[in-house]
């Protein structure tokens, strides 16, 4: 029988474990990172936990070929990695070694013998396709939160050689760290926000609402108003808050694919025909510059 | 020493229509050099100029990528020459077969110091081809790269890490996916497009077998949650705000 492999380079792998468990195969984890990450993975409900040793000053990506060798040697069926740049570097090397398909957007995975059926969203989430793979397949899925600890399996240390990459310097951001994944309420801004200073308006609303602040991709990459780990949608974050308030975001599918699981969606836009107006619970047609202060005041009264 | 940029000629699914059965029609979506790839070409041009070396584009895909329009679109953005692998079997190919063909093309270029790629393709958007390519070449891959410089034989790479950044040193060649905002790509003028027609292009036949591709056994539209779409008028912003707060409180989400 094939083994389901999960690639672990950060603690947020509950999403991978959920997918792995549904397949009903033995599950093995290969861990790149400090020993404590391996120790916590060993309690996450896996049958085996292989650890490549302390990474020293090598970044996660330096262990791509080592991870590929471990997985290739372990009867891989489905290989799962989280949608993060470092995990993609690892799973890419696995796909190269196995010459196996590497895919994103899976919403359902089933196995039948060596055959794997993957239902997934394609082309940025505009349609779904079910694909049959005869042999191993690498899937990049949402990593999710930190798994609940349970009974531990032993951590098996494997000697690994790192590729010639070293971290020279870390430059942490001065921007405060925000736990978007865990936020129950999220206020997100799009291109309707004209200037970086105007974020103060949004911050006041978020504070009144007890919400975290996210954005659409152009706000993080085009105008750089917010750090890149705050944008929602294809290639960015997938969020499932109770309430998602979108300010000046048109609602192209590339964005909305990241919040389809949200409870209540409010869209605020000057354009009554913006796509978001069809994919929301409350369609507020108006200027965010007048509505946002009014909303902040109404929340406080 | 050579700088290589891998790029894709792809349709923008923003222009696609999806039939009720989930079949995607891309016939109205005009192909172009994929959204973020001009950024990679721009970064590559600057690097090649700084190092005084050649900038070679590599592209793989269906027969249409060898057409003069596709070649010129890439060459006019600053490449010195182009290597393409155009084959029917690469039309709509997944990350692994695409990377296999790219590895073949990269293998034809001498003394490659670095392979650059865009953040992700406009159509698949999987962010996977650079890391599969790196795996095939046995090189490291790094993504969200903001800057690359040379230090002797090493590459010094600045890349995004969480909400901050990290400087990484690579001894030897690497595959780097540049961040979407790493550079502002140039707009090709008439002179660039005319000059592009004269630049060398090598068309390689696809060598060897491609890895097996999954078989599509079903298609479906994306099920959308039924949302209320209750319209709130903001002629009076304060009244609108009170109406929304009351509604959200009634929904139990505030």
Image: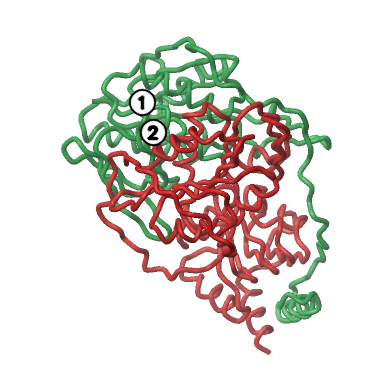
Q: Secondary structure at mark 1?
A: loop
Q: Position of residue A231 (x, y in %)?
A: 54, 57
- Which residue sits at x=31%, y=26%? B55
Which chain appears red?
A
Say how many tags the image has: 2
Question: Quick one: which residue is furthest to the left in this view?
Answer: B152
Q: Which mark is residue B41?
A: 2
Which chain is green in the rendering?
A: B
Mark 1 or mark 2, which is nearer the start of the sequence?
2
x, y percent for residue A72 = 49, 33
Q: Mark number for residue B79?
A: 1
User: What distance separates the C-alpha of mark 2 from that of mark 1?
Assistant: 7 Å
Instruction: Please indicate whether residue A105 sits to the left or right of residue B110 in the image.
Output: right
Residue drawn at the location 48% of the way across and 33% of the way down: A73
Tell me the crowding category of disc 2: few under 14, some 14 to 19, or many 20 or more residues within 10 angstroms, Cα based. many
Which dot marks residue A46?
Answer: none
Would residue B123 be seen by someone viewing this image from the given angle? no
| Visible residue check, residue A66 | yes
**Considering depth in this image, is A85 or A8 the residue closer to the camera?**
A8
């Amino acid at each position: 029988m094939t083994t389901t492999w999960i690639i672990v380079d950060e603690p947020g792998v509950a999403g991978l474990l959920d997918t792995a468990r549904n397949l009903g195969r033995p599950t093995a984890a290969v861990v790149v990172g400090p020993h404590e990450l391996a120790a916590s993975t060993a309690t996450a409900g896996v049958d085996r936990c292989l650890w490549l040793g302390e990474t020293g000053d090598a970044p996660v990506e330096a262990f791509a070929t080592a991870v590929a060798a471990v997985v290739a040697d372990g009867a891989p069926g489905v290989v799962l990695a989280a949608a993060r740049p470092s995990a993609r570097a690892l799973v890419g090397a696995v796909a190269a070694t196995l010459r196996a398909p590497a895919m994103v957007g899976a919403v359902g995975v089933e196995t039948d013998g060596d055959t794997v059926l993957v239902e997934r969203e394609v082309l940025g989430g505009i349609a779904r396709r079910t694909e049959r793979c005869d042999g191993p397949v690498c899937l990049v899925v949402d990593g999710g939160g930190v798994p609940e600890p349970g009974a531990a399996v032993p951590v098996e240390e494997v000697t690994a050689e790192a590729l010639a990459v070293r971290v020279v310097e870390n430059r942490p951001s001065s921007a405060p760290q925000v736990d978007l994944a865990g936020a129950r309420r999220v206020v997100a801004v799009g291109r309707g926000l004209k200037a970086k200073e105007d974020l103060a308006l949004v911050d006041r609303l978020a504070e009144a609402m007890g919400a975290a602040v996210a954005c659409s991709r152009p706000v993080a990459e085009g105008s750089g108003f917010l750090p890149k780990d705050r944008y929602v949608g294809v290639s960015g974050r997938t969020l499932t808050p109770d309430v998602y308030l979108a300010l000046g975001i048109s609602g192209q599918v590339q964005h909305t694919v990241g919040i389809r699981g949200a409870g209540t969606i409010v869209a605020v836009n000057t354009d009554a025909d913006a796509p978001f107006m069809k994919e929301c619970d409350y369609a507020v047609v108006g200027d965010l510059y007048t509505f946002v202060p009014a909303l902040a005041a109404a929340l406080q009264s | 020493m050579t700088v290589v940029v891998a790029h894709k000629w792809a349709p923008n699914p923003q222009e696609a229509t999806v039939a009720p059965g989930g079949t995607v029609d891309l016939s109205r979506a005009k192909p172009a050099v994929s959204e973020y790839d001009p950024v990679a070409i721009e970064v590559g041009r600057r690097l090649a100029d700084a190092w005084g070396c050649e900038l070679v584009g590599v592209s793989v895909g269906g027969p249409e990528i060898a057409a003069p329009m596709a070649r010129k679109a890439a060459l006019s953005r600053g490449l010195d020459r182009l290597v393409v692998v155009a084959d029917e079997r690469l039309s709509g190919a997944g990350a692994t077969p695409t990377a296999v063909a790219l590895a073949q093309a990269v293998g034809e270029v001498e003394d490659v110091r670095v392979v650059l790629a865009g953040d992700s393709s406009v159509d698949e958007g999987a962010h996977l081809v650079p890391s599969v390519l790196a795996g095939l070449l046995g090189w490291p891959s790094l993504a969200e790269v903001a800057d690359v410089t040379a230090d002797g034989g090493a590459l010094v790479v600045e890349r995004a890490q969480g909400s901050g950044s990290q400087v990484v040193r690579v001894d030897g060649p690497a595959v780097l996916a540049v961040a979407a905002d790493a550079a502002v790509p140039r707009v090709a003028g008439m002179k660039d497009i005319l000059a592009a027609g004269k630049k060398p292009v090598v068309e390689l036949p696809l060598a060897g077998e491609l890895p097996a591709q999954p078989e599509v056994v079903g298609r479906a539209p994306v099920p959308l949650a039924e949302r209320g779409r209750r319209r709130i008028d903001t002629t009076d912003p304060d009244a609108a705000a009170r109406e929304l707060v009351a509604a959200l409180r009634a929904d139990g989400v505030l």
